Amino acid sequence: GDAQAIDFVPVSAANAIQQVASGAVDLVAAALPQEIGEEEKVDFSQTYYRGQQALLVRADEQLTALSALNDTTLAAIEGSSAIAQLQTIANREGISLNILPFPSFNQAYAALKAREVDGVISLQAVLEPITIAESGYIVVSGLFPGEPYSIALPNYDERFQDLVNFTLQEMKADGTYDRIARRWQPTAEPTAIEIWPGTSYLDLDLIPIVRVAAGEYTRGNLYGFPDERAEQTIFLDEFYIDQYEVTNRQYADCVGAGRCNLPRLPRSVNFANYYAATEFGNYPVIWVTWQDAADYCAFRGKRLPTEAEWEKAGRGPENQLYPWGKAEPTNEANFNYLVGDASAVGSFPQDRSGYGAYDMGGNVREWVADWYEWDYYLNAPQNNPMGPD
């Protein structure tokens, strides 16, 4: 994307959640711990960092044990989860602490240097570089439990949440995340992208999506069926589309939530228990009506693609007749009962468009938003066509 199109706004630990919840910012990507109590206000991405609060103290004061902190004054950042954590620890250990909140870390650190406080609480990764740059300070770790750090997002926007999570996973897969992490913490092992405390991102039923850039493509096929022979150059705005067909497991989530009807039949061509059997969880759902498909999309916070969007996603940026090129299908896709039934989504690598969408040339039929009209192509608008009225 265009980095110049992003507005970066400073936030603090004290106001970060409220900034997202109020709509003042679209996301907060600062060092923000994922707290269960805040999940009614915002959603969180997958954990991208396992952080731990620590204590920065002067080396000559020997404040390296909990008992030594009795009757001390410690600085913390306003809104930091460490304030409540440290107070809980103090109550448990029977020690007395005076905790002073500061609007920023720089102000808290300045108070330590001026000997106005005895220590500063912050992320261990923030404090350790100070001990390298300046002598006379040490970091006391092990006082606080580890915390998951995530990106805060607006509530109930599953599409945006999926996009952020998938972007984090892509950054991890191509090495970008590890390179950034090592610049910040050269000696630490980069964190996995996961749900805290240890569920792999890849085990989640998050739904990968692909981006289709704004631009033109040629719709129709001069040598195809009569209703598609009116080739036309169409312009579409940017959009996103699921990378894979909707699976039985994903659709079952909607049924379980009472938002979707069961498929009209539970079977496929060869398998009587196709919909319900665990072994077919990653196979495309079938025997659903257009309304079922629309209800499922609404359940996920999405919509059905228009026919024009679907075709462009399948053609890819090269505007090919098929995801793999111009040649008629042989074994590139699950076409004409090649395997005798539906196949697991994404099983045919060549049936992947240039945008990254799978099974656009085969497997099962897919619903789009438009109604059908046989001569629609003859007079359809050329910009973002929505289908017949």
Image (spheres, rainbow, N blue to C red):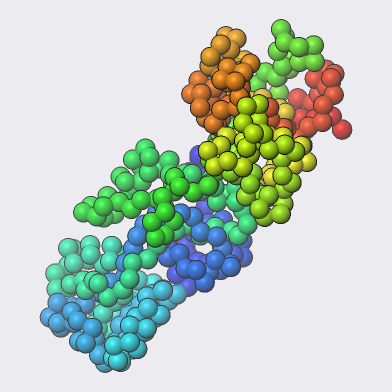
Residue 122 vertical placement versus 342 (above, below): below
Camera-nearest residue between 269 and 118: 269
**Who's the residue at 38% across and 40% down the image?**
173
Position of 267 with respect to 80 (left or right) is: right
Q: Would you say residue 275 is visible in this rendering?
A: yes
Residue 284 vertical placement versus 25 (above, below): above
Residue 91: image quadrant is bottom left
**Who's the residue at 79% across and 26% down the image?**
381
Q: Where is residue 73 in the image (x, y as percent from the top left)?
A: 29, 87
Q: Which residue lies furthest to the front in this view?
A: 272
Position of the C terminus, as image quadrant, is top right
Camera-nearest residue between 116 and 274: 274
Residue 51: image quadrant is bottom left
Residue 113 vertical placement versus 313 (above, below): below
Q: Where is residue 216 in the image (x, y as percent from the top left)?
A: 65, 24
**Who's the residue at 21% across and 73% down the image?**
140
Q: Would you say residue 354 is visible in this rendering?
A: no
Residue 111: image quadrant is bottom left
Position of 255 with respect to 115 (left or right) is: right
Q: Position of residue 250 (x, y in %)?
A: 60, 44
**Who's the residue at 68% across and 27% down the image?**
365
